[in-house]
Image (spheres, rainbow, N blue to C red):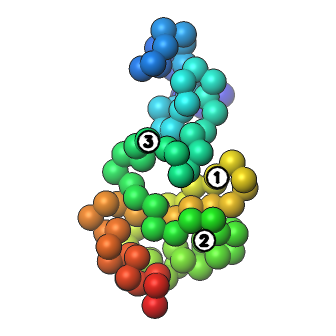
Amino acid sequence: MGWWETIRRPCSSRSAPCSCSGWSCAGSSGRPVPGPRAPNLGLLTVVATGLTRQEALQQRAKLGEADIRSSMSRRRDGLLDVLVFHDDADTARLLLDH
């Protein structure tokens, strides 16, 4: 069992215990928030959306070559989004559009 499975804390919108890791938990259900409707992704911004795993890996490799750190997030429909830090978002979008 991971450390995130042992933490029990009240969710911000409910008093019921929540055992999610705190990343993108939707209330006490622990289910991920769908990408387009996610209210706050913290320090990250989506720069590419609706990709297959292979496409997302290719996009991340291109970003990595430009020293832009990135992450992938799986959506409910099974496709992936590529995310970068806010400060890198404009540069990342320009790079991925070319």
For badge 2, the amino acid type reads: Ala
Q: Give the image location of residue 39, x and y in percent.
A: 43, 41
For marks 1 and 2, the one nearer the N-term is 2
CA distance separating discs 2 and 3:
22 Å
Tag 1: amino acid: Arg
- Tell me if I can see residue 56 in this picture: yes
Residue occupying image coordinates x 68% and y 68%: 53
Label located before the other in sequence (2 or 3): 3
Rounded to the nearest whole Å, what is the CA distance between mark 3 and mark 1?
14 Å
Residue furthest out toward the front: 37
Q: Secondary structure at mark 3?
A: loop
As measured in the structure, the alpha-carbon distance from the residue carrying label 1 to the one carrying label 2 is 12 Å
Q: Position of residue 97 (x, y in %)?
A: 46, 84
Residue 35 x/y as whole percent: 55, 50
| Apparent side of residue 26 relative to residue 31 in the rendered image (left or right) | left
Residue at 32% x, 73% y is 90
Return the residue at label 1: 75
Residue 68 sits in quarter = bottom left
The residue beneath circle 2 is 56
- Residue at position x 35%, y 68% in the image: 89
Mark number displayed over residue 39: 3
